[in-house]
Image (spheres, rainbow, N blue to C red):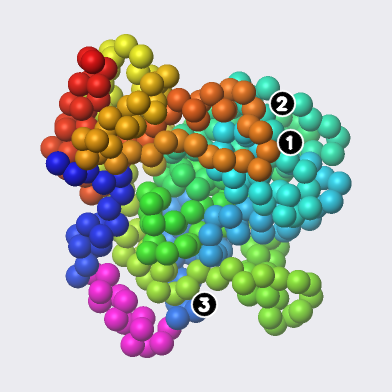
Amino acid sequence: MQIKFFNPGLGYSKMKDEIIVEIDRVLSAGDLVLRKDMEDFEKSLAEYVGVKYAVALNSCTDALYLALRALKIGKGDEVLVPSRTFVASAQVIVQAGATPVFYDIDGKMEYSDNIKAIIPVHIEGEFDKHFADILKLAEEKGWHIIEDSAQALGATFNGHKAGSFGTIACFSFYPAKILGAYGDAGALVTDDKDIYEWVKDCRNHFKDSNAEWGINSRMDNLQAAVLNVKFKYLDQILKIRKNIADMYTEGLRGIMGLELPPHTEGRVWQDYIVRTEQRDLLYNFLKEQGIETLKNNYPFPVPKLPQAQSYEDETLRLPCNENLTDEEILEIISKIKEFFKQ
């Protein structure tokens, strides 16, 4: 049995009839950029997250970058960010002219008076483990919170969805995400009207005002039309992924040398990640069995902090998406058990 980590072709085949209709409509009308489908998606996203405004963009990376610029964070400023994250979370801070200040998995932070914001990362579908402390600290210090919610659409904390806490939050709709387009796509959300208007203008070069230098970061209307179709199934997708995670946890519980991810309240299952000191051996064994997994490494432009580095060196992403069958999940469980019995 061959099991892919991610199979976008299979996902497309399941929604093909609906998606083809929308693609044909958009292309036939010539509604390609900054059109109604994109505006409809922005409204749906804002309503779903529980905020006033959403701006559809090219990527979550652009959303993070524009968040910093909108808050006028730049040269001489510092921004707290976890070491355990994808490179983009820190990259954008440098690109905005500011300095990233990293904190490790234990949440211990060193900060100065130059800190202007913190970017908690809700990674793997789970809120930043120190989010309660972050909310309190940011309020005390007057820092902006920019939620990196690229992997956490639909996750909740104290009954509120990811993206509804910070001054700004950023989402990814890259194809492999919980809600994935068929190309690059992202969005920024906020309750601040001035930020909303600024980002809307900036994503299109400040074309109508030339007030300052903008960028080209428009989500094209075709991707928005696809996302509007998929949005209808988001709750169903989240439920299927949770069921897969439950199957993994039930089937893999009790294996010595294998640490399973926590089922924390409110999390969603962007990934199901296991931890073992035999990570590379397990990866190679599953590959030989026709099971595609991903090593959970996020290279950084600077050395990672020790706990984050250790975590990434020992973790493996198992297939966890709505297109997998129960038979495939049981096969993965069976082969992992076989590996640990050797």
Residue 230 placed where, x, y %? 32, 60
Give the mark, 3 or 2, whose residue is nearer the N terminus. Answer: 3
Residue at the spot of label 3: 34
What's under tag 2, amino acid-wise? Met
What's under tag 3, amino acid-wise? Leu
Residue range in magenta is 18-31
Q: What residue do we see at 35% from left, 58% from top?
A: 231
What's under tag 1, amino acid-wise? Val
How many residues crowd around disc 2 within 10 Å: few (fewer than 14), some, or many (20 or more)?
A: few
Q: Front-most of 61 and 41?
A: 61
Name the image quarter holding residue 25: bottom left
Mark in front: 3 vs 2: 2
Q: Are marks 3 and 2 in contact (CB under 8 Å)?
A: no
Q: Are marks 1 and 2 in contact (CB under 8 Å)?
A: yes
Q: CA distance from mark 1 to mark 2?
A: 9 Å
Residue 95 placed where, x, y %? 72, 54
Residue at the spot of label 2: 109
- Left/right of residue 5 with respect to residue 184 in the rendered view: left
Mark in front: 1 vs 2: 1
Mark in front: 1 vs 3: 1
Residue 322 placed where, x, y %? 26, 47
Q: Are marks 1 and 3 in contact (CB under 8 Å)?
A: no
Q: Which mark is residue 101?
A: 1
Q: What residue do we see at 25% from left, 39% from top?
A: 291
- Left/right of residue 318 with respect to residue 134 in the rendered view: left
Mark 1 residue element: strand
Mark 3 residue element: loop
Name the image quarter holding residue 303: top right
Q: What residue do we see at 44% from left, 53% from top?
A: 48
Q: What residue do we see at 57% from left, 27% from top?
A: 308
Determine if the magenta segment contains residue 25. Answer: yes
